[in-house]
Image (spheres, grey):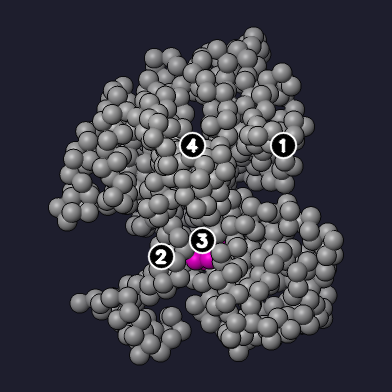
Amino acid sequence: MSQGVNPEQKAAPLIASEANLYNFRLKNSDLIDCARPVIEQASLFLQDLETILFLTDYQGLNLQIVGDPRTLDDANTIGLVEGSGWNEVVSGSNAVGTSMATRRPTQVHGEEHYCQGFKPWTCTAAVIADPYDNQMMGVIDLSGLCSMYDKFHIPLVVAWASQIQAGLARKTSEQWSSIIEHSNSSFGRFRNSGKLLLDKKGRLINFSSNASAALDALGIDYDPDSKRRLSMERFGGETIVYPHDEGSWISEDWVEPIRRNDELIGFQVLVPAGRINTHRMTRIQEATTPLKPDFDPFKEIYGESASFKSSADKARRAASTPLPVLILGDTGVGKEVFAKAIHDSSNYADGPFIDLNCGAFTKDILSSELFGHVEGAFTGSKKGGLIGKIEAANGGTLFLDEIGEMPLELQPIFLRVLQEKKIYRVGDIKPIPVDFRLIAATNCDLKSAVNEGLFRKDLYFRLSTVTISLDPLSGRKDDIEGIAKLVLDRIREENNGQISARRFSPALLTALKTREWPGNIRELVNVVECMCFMSPNETLTIDDLPDGYRRGESSLQTEFYNTVLTQPHGNLDIAEKATIEAAIKQSEGNMTQAAKQLGIAKSTLYQKMKKYGLKKPQ
């Protein structure tokens, strides 16, 4: 990607003047707002460490930069200033540009830079993605002169990027709660029209169970399940820079703007039950409304193994009841996919499906997320108040992931909601009636948590009325090939044929089937996506596997990312602890080898093990 860039280039080009930079920052206001805690932390943390931190937009444009004052002066000499461009097409190989191209955390050290002016520097960068559809929103980069080279900069930027993404997820959740609260309360209740609920960025918040059939009957090629953004720009929505549906098929009289205090915040699109296109009659007959008794959302989930079929059969039976469901399984096994299929199969299918990760918030924030709050309920409370997830799920399904992380103090309050079917917003004395289906999920042993006094016994028995266990991918070896091939098909469809058909070599399929996959289906999907996008070959081979997945290679990086990226708050101590644990595991308890992998002294390794309460494997 450095073609056309002068290798003798001394500085990065200035892409945006001070006047234009204001507009770029305005367009990236959500990203900047959510990065503010990290930027403020880094501005203090890096003061005397001869290091700087900067934030770019999705094109590599430097939006903000902070850090050690002397290093900032040095950065000026190579054009590392606000408004400069770090895409590979203008600045050659560098950490920002390369991480954008590969979508992986990247460290570029000294001579690895393409341009002469950057060779005295070491730069480490990680991509920040939109939690909705993983589209790249920006990059965070930690840079300093080569003398400051540190392998631990990689977990630092990964943790910071994760923290920003968690902030973006919370901000999106707040925006969507407000849209749901101010939308037509009958959304999802009537079967005649298909309904789509969107924010200004074209992200689909919710849709009625008959939306696909209504669109299909009108010959409209838009799949609500695909998470493909839908442009509402001509109705006042924001310009979409990512792949999206232009929305030219939307009739103006289908659109209901959603406003809050005269501010446009989203859209409800009502797709009429139109006349079926005779050229598409066969397809429509095969894909009639999902309200038919024989509609089975579980057929959309791939699985041929005996354990999968057993879990799916139990989930089907549970769906037809109003009973709470508890889904057990490791991270990445598809608990939310099962929850959504149960919802779509149930009597609550016409209502919303609202999900919330109980492990992603502090106790106070989780209370507000669950129950909502009135204006002025506490310092920093949202103007106009906030609808909670329980209230938003009224008439539909509430899916609580990582239920084992719910603070003990909130558990009796939530249990009372289940018993009395009413809630009180934080700061309010007026009860609000609610009726919803509860599905909870966890990857921890709730029985042990009950015995240790960390989880209430009465709430556990209420949640576990129907318990469904999902096996890890290592216990479903027969499903690995089918899942991998479905990922290839999905990528080809989503990219409108721009990516040629891919197939797996027999040796690669064997390698995929024999791997343990600690990250389960999520990890397998990530690996297949990486190979599909990064390989120029139509037949994918073992050589196309990402770093750390080929036989004999270290999987330290893979294990670290799987661990750190699931941490809700991106805490730096968590990142460091996870890295050390992965290194010790990879070296099978050889402390000398683990220290070498980490790039630190053996004595330092023992100090850090003591700090985090880690013990050497026996």
Q: Is residue 178 left or right of residue 469?
A: right
- Which residue appears at 43% of the width and 86% of the height? 600
| Whole-number angstrom distance, CA of label 1 to CA of label 3 | 28 Å
Residue 618, quarter of picture: bottom left
Which callout, 4 or 1, points to the residue nearer the camera? 4
Please report the residue visible at 68 percent of the width from the left and 43 percent of the height from the top.
Answer: 243
**Cα distance, mark 2 to mark 1?**
40 Å
Number of labels in the image equals 4
Is disc 4 in contact with disc 2, using a CB cutoff of under 8 Å? no
Q: Which residue is mark 2?
A: 559
Q: CA distance from mark 4 to mark 1?
A: 23 Å
10 Å crowding of disc 3: few (<14), some (14-19), many (20+): many
- Residue 216 visible in the shown view: no
Identify the secondary structure beneath mark 2.
helix
Is 517 or 502 nearer to us in this picture?
517
Could you tell me which residue is drawn at 28 percent across and 50 percent down?
409
Q: Earlier in the sequence, mark 1 or mark 3?
A: 3
Q: Check disc 2: other Cα within 10 Å, few if <14, some if 14-19, many if 20+.
A: many
Task: Give the residue number, with chain letter if any, for mark 3.
Answer: 163
The magenta region covers 158-162
* Residue under the image location 83 percent in, 59 percent down: 20
Q: Mark 1 near mark 3, Cβ–Cβ under 8 Å?
A: no
Q: Earlier in the sequence, mark 2 or mark 1?
A: 1
Q: Is residue 88 magenta?
A: no
Mark carried by residue 260: none
Mark before the other along the chain sequence, 4 or 2: 4
